[in-house]
Image (cartoon, rainbow, N blue to C red):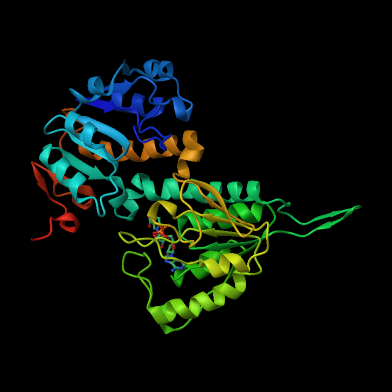
Amino acid sequence: MLIGVPSETDKIETRVAATPETVKKYISLGADVVVQAGAGTASGIPDADYEAAGAKIAKTAKDVFKDADIILKVRRPSAEETKLLKAKSVVIAIMDPYGQDEAVKALADAKVAAFAMELMPRITRAQVMDILSSQANLAGYRAVIDGAAEYGRAMPMMMTAAGTVPAARVFIMGAGVAGLQAIATAKRLGAVVTATDVRPAAKEQVESLGAKFIAVEDEEFKQAETAGGYAKEMSKEYQAKQAELVAAHIAKQDIVITTALIPGRPAPKLVSKKMVESMKPGSVIVDLAVERGGNVEAGKAGGVSEHKGVKIVGYLNMPGRLAASASALYAKNLLAFVETLVDKETKALAVNWEDELVQATCLTRDGAIVHSAFQPKAK
Ligand code: NAD
């Protein structure tokens, strides 16, 4: 069994799907590992470290893809990479399949078993494979660090002989994994932290971190959590009421961090242009949802922009701004999943197609799209 780890080809991707630590584990599972030269550079991992862990280094992507039975990637293979995949091989990545019918079909046509790690069920057994959590946690932390760096004032209250610097007011919108880490990080930096979410369960979690919860708590709010624990899209009426409450709150904030996502849908717009304009000049907004269309109306994806004196931070690939940590955790998530695909006795690939983790994440297999959520639409 050969496991291939190519370099990521997307320009904004700094992460890598395996580390020397996970390479060692794959080898102890009975696999051979081939890593493309330079694959770990942006994560601070030199080729020599992979070699020392037992991997072979290949010069080109072609050399990695050619014979690999399992390809480990961060991002979905590009059209060119998809052509390099060996028929009947397995490819595991963040597939980002929503609205990508053509790319999903190309993977099916390549006759590979393509697994989308972000579709992993949020159940206890799969916690160690939960890439959404491992990456969102880092993104939430980094959002506060980036926000604080753009903010021209100190975060904690400082009482000095020369006067008092007030504590920054930080408002976190969306209290999932990223939002909760953002709350904890902003608290550690000494900010006065508030947060909001549409899920009622978030209230207790926000309060347990010492932040104040801000939300319209009507009947719809109480019913809002779906069975899977994700947010569902709220009614127009609720959105209007919440927007009004939040608008008044935002005007008083120094840093706003938005993290709101709804799986499979564009990110909800939470901060209108008017709300941005209500903030004091020098305030900062960090939009963690830019890759899903953004939570902030006036924001631009791919860097820091300014709207009427308010800085809007919209970096793509926030976890990738902490590449070494993000790669280490992502690689371990992948290792835990691969371990379930390998027969410990024969040390060969032995996918149990009935396994709920496999069924939830497998997009394509044997030339067909097998995932029910991504079936081609009838013409
Ligand atoms: P996410 O990234 O999908 O969304 C981020 C947050 O934005 C969520 O809390 C969501 O409720 C919120 N949101 C959506 N629309 C909003 C709006 N209009 N206004 C304000 N907030 C809005 O979420 P996530 O971080 O992946 O977490 C989703 C859920 O999964 C949470 O309940 C979390 O605790 C749970 N979870 C469970 C496990 C596990 O059991 N293994 C692991 C991780 C997360």
- Report the label total: 0
Q: Residue, x 32% and y 22% (percent of image)?
A: 35
Residue 270 appears anywhere in the view:
yes
Quadrant hosting residue 249: bottom right
* 188 vs 245, nearest the viewer: 245
Q: Which residue extends farthest bottom?
A: 219
Image-based side of 378 in relation to 65, left or right: left
Q: Position of residue 110 (x, y in %)?
A: 13, 36
Q: Residue, x 40% and y 36% (percent of image)?
A: 13
* 68 vs 241, nearest the viewer: 241
Q: Position of residue 144 (x, y in %)?
A: 59, 51
Q: Quadrant of the C terminus?
A: bottom left
Question: Does 358 sit above or below residue 347?
Answer: below
* 229 vs 234, nearest the viewer: 234
Q: Position of residue 97 (x, y in %)?
A: 25, 50
* 373 vs 10, nearest the viewer: 10
Question: Does 154 sit above or below residue 225?
Answer: above
Residue 352 appears anywhere in the view:
no
Q: Which residue extends farthest right?
A: 161
Image-based side of 248 in relation to 342, left or right: right
Image-based side of 369 in relation to 5, left or right: left
Image-based side of 275 in relation to 219, left or right: right
Q: Residue, x 45% and y 46% (percent of image)?
A: 316
Q: Quadrant of the N terminus?
A: top left
Which quarter of the frame holds ligand 1?
bottom left
Q: Position of residue 88 (x, y in %)?
A: 11, 34
Q: Residue, x 65% and y 52% (percent of image)?
A: 188
